[in-house]
Image (cartoon, rainbow, N blue to C red):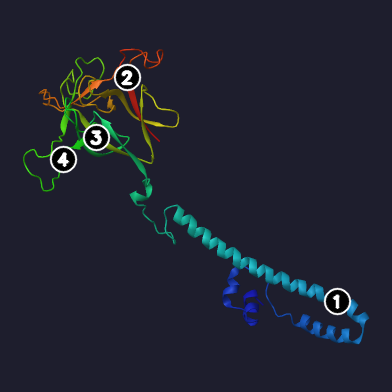
Amino acid sequence: MSSEKLVMDQGFAPSLAGLGLTRPYKRQSGRRTGLVLLAGGCLGGVLVCAVLMPLVYVTMSDLQLEVTELRNLVISNSMSTATSSTEDQGNGTAVGGAHRERRQADLTPEFGDVYVRWGREDCGGNAETIYAGVVGSGWYHHYGGGSDYQCLPLEGVEWNNPVSGYQHNSYMYGAEYEVNSNGYFSTDNMESINNPLNYDVPCSVCHVAGRSAHVMIPARLSCPQGWSKEYSGYLMSSNHAHYSNKNFICVDGAPNLRAGSSADLNGALLYLVEAQCGSLPCGPYISGYELTCVVCTK
């Protein structure tokens, strides 16, 4: 008689026959009869009970072994199914083998950092250009106004209830390079222009994915270990004799120039920054040397 027939005869569910059991589960009629006789013998005398008790232990142990084997098979099949589903999803495949297409958003880090690339109209291949524009700030010889440089967009400029004329006495001007000779900046991105003097300064606002911080380091052209270099160049700011103080910014060493913008209209001006030995430690800093800079992310 086959093991499947034995299972069906004894009242087990048909699904258990497919679990891969190695032994048939047949009714243990002889063992049950033995148990009844054993009970009667124990009533008759302690000696008979002592002799037959090992048989009871062997019978119960055999039944427990069969139940344990059945339970292990059920657990093993359940774990195999769960593992298969997990592996499919991890490999980009839905349960059942159907291909699950990964969205681009799943592969892009959800965090990043933003910085301004002064002197360039794009961020290059390392970062996304959020927008490109021109550098602006307050007039170079005004006492008041803003002291920081801004990157103003050239496209998508929006107004909200503007009134023509000058009513508020605070103004934004474009910035120009004030570099009298070009022994400093690379001309690779200047489109056949040899000297950036009086040209408008472009800029771009950049987003780099997977980074959470950025730093501008003056007097350096390389980044610390563990940081990624975005660009390097020269430290620039306003003229020390002008009324309007400006902050220091790192201008790209291979800058762009806005074609046709060399009309010398002034505004917010950018000068190379030179070190002053004495107030700065002499040795690493040399009077009259133009300070470099680098922008790093991590």
Spatial CA distance of label 2 from label 3 is 22 Å
**Sequence-earlier tag: 4 or 2:** 4
Q: Say whether residue 121 is visible.
A: no
Q: For the N terminus, which image quadrant?
A: bottom right
At 85% across and 74% down in the image, what residue appears? Answer: 54
Cβ atoms at labels 4 and 2 below 8 Å apart: no
Which amino acid lies under the numbered mark 3 shown in the image of this protein?
Ser
The image shows residue 47, relative to residue 265, as above or below, that is: below
Residue where numbered disc 4 is placed: 155
> From the viewer's perspective, is 233 left or right of 39?
left
Residue 261 marker: none
**Sequence-earlier tag: 1 or 4:** 1
Which amino acid lies under the numbered mark 4 shown in the image of this protein?
Glu
Spatial CA distance of label 3 from label 4 is 12 Å
Cβ atoms at labels 2 and 3 below 8 Å apart: no
Q: Say whether residue 77 is visible.
A: yes
Q: Name the front one of labels 1 and 4.
A: 4
Residue 53 marker: 1
**Sequence-earlier tag: 1 or 3:** 1
User: Residue 141, position in %: x, y?
Assistant: 16, 25
Residue where numbered disc 2 is placed: 291
Q: Name the front one of labels 2 and 3.
A: 2
Which amino acid lies under the numbered mark 1 shown in the image of this protein?
Met
At 36% across and 42% down in the image, what residue appears? Answer: 112
User: Residue 5, position in %: x, y?
Assistant: 63, 78
Residue 204 marker: 3
Spatial CA distance of label 4 from label 2 is 33 Å
**SS for callout 3:** strand
Mark 3 Cα within 10 Å, few/some/many (few <14, many 20+)?
many
**SS for callout 4:** loop
